């Protein structure tokens, strides 16, 4: 049986090369003796999966993907287009959705992750006051919370579109949710999620700077609280799991130089129960010292790797899987 190859997004400006964001992973993979193929990410997103995979050779056998996030429906098209060419993405479309979207993994991680309630939506439309009130009451109806969609938050617009100081203030909840939905626009994934806010080590609610921060991780040079560079948010560990084993434990890409040593004792069984082969868990430790919590779960194929991390063990495990 052949070793899995890894598919990376192609550089839009030079389709024969990996996208610059993933070039170092492709290089490391080559040094390990692994093979890669390229996919046209824009074509995938546009729903033209067959065209997107035309550079993947026929009958390429087992395949992993390492690339940009895809909506679950686009991932399903991607998997089907590869199957039609005799390839086999090792994470199935249902497996991807289960790890990538909060409602897919929440049932397994309930109790180990902040309590959450979600409101499915059909496109970028904010839920009405009644739906919000019901979701808030499912979380106990009072106390602080955060807003996100099934996949992402607007953590860089913390006060405006992420943090809710008091769930009982439904007007304020509605305002934050509306702004969140407006900013997500067509990228809103699945629906709106409310999660009970928990105090994590390194976090302070007043400091998630709403101004001047770029996309993912751009504020990693030192938060106002001076804790570690997570910009007022929790210090997180990102654990990479393959077949239920932690193959890489490192910092979250938002604070790539942070040293982290999470306790994985309780998390391991949950990851195994989820049953997805390649996933990440972002873990934060509670400010009161009562242990590690799962902030979110992700599909390992689309989780960002922190710059400078030694990913050779992870990549070697992927091509040996
Ligand atoms: N329930 C919570 N309690 C306290 N802080 C939270 C909670 N949920 C999220 N946060 C904070 O907000 C940040 C963003 O949340 P989350 O990780 O869920 O969204 P994201 O946009 O998917 O982030 P990324 O994909 O970059 O990890 C977290 O890193 C954490 O610091
Ligand atoms: Mg996160």
Image (cartoon, helix red, strand yellow):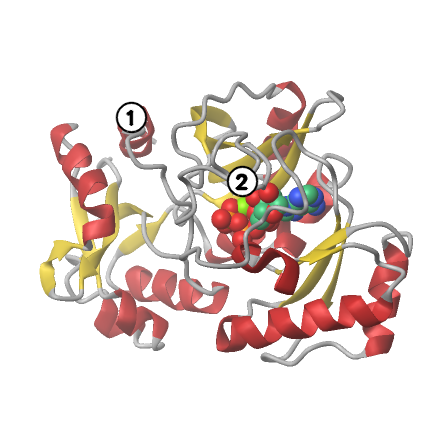
Q: Against 123, is 274 above or below?
A: above
Query: What residue is disc 2 on?
Result: 224
- Comparing 215 with 159, the one in front is 159
**Residue 95: x, y in percent?**
52, 50
Instruction: Check if mark 2's residue and mark 1's residue have beta carbons within 8 Å.
Output: no
User: Which residue occupies 76% across, 24% down?
Assistant: 288
Pointer 2 or 1: first along the chain? 2
Secondary element under disc 2, as helix, strand or loop, is loop
Q: Against 2, is 79 above or below?
A: below
**Can residue 236 be seen in the rendering of this structure?**
yes
- Comparing 298 with 144, the one in front is 144
Secondary element under disc 1, as helix, strand or loop, is loop
- Relative to 85, 284 lies left or right: right
**Residue 313: x, y in percent?**
31, 24
Q: How many marks?
A: 2
**Closer to the observer: label 2 or label 1?**
2
């Amino acid at each position: 049986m052949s070793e899995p190859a890894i598919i990376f997004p192609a550089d839009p400006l030079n389709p024969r090369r990996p996208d610059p964001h993933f070039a170092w992973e492709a290089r490391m993979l080559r040094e390990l003796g692994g093979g890669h193929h390229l996919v046209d990410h824009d074509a995938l997103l546009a729903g033209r999966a067959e065209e997107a995979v035309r550079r993947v050779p026929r009958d390429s056998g087992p395949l992993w993907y390492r690339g940009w996030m895809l909506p679950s429906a686009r991932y399903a098209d991607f998997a089907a287009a590869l199957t039609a060419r005799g390839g086999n993405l090792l994470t199935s479309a249902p497996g991807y959705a289960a790890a990538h979207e909060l409602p897919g993994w929440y049932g397994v991680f309930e109790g180990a992750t902040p309590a959450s309630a979600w409101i499915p939506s059909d496109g970028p439309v904010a839920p009405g006051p009644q739906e919000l009130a019901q979701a808030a009451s499912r979380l106990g109806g009072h106390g602080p919370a955060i807003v996100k969609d099934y996949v992402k938050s607007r953590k860089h617009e913390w006060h405006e579109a992420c943090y809710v100081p008091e769930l009982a203030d439904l007007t304020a909840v509605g305002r934050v949710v509306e702004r969140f939905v407006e900013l997500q626009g067509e990228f809103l994934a699945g629906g709106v999620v409310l999660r009970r806010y928990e105090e994590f080590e390194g976090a302070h609610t007043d400091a998630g700077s709403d101004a001047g921060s770029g996309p993912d991780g751009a504020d990693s040079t030192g938060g106002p609280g001076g804790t570690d560079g997570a910009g007022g948010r929790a210090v997180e560990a990102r654990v990479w799991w393959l077949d239920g084993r932690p193959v890489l434990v490192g910092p979250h890409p938002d604070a790539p130089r942070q040293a982290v040593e999470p306790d994985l004792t309780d998390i391991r069984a949950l990851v195994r129960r989820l049953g997805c082969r390649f996933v990440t868990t972002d873990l934060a430790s509670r400010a009161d010292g009562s242990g590690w919590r799962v902030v979110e779960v992700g599909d390992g194929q689309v989780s960002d790797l922190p710059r400078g991390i030694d990913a050779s063990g992870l990549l070697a495990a992927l091509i040996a899987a």
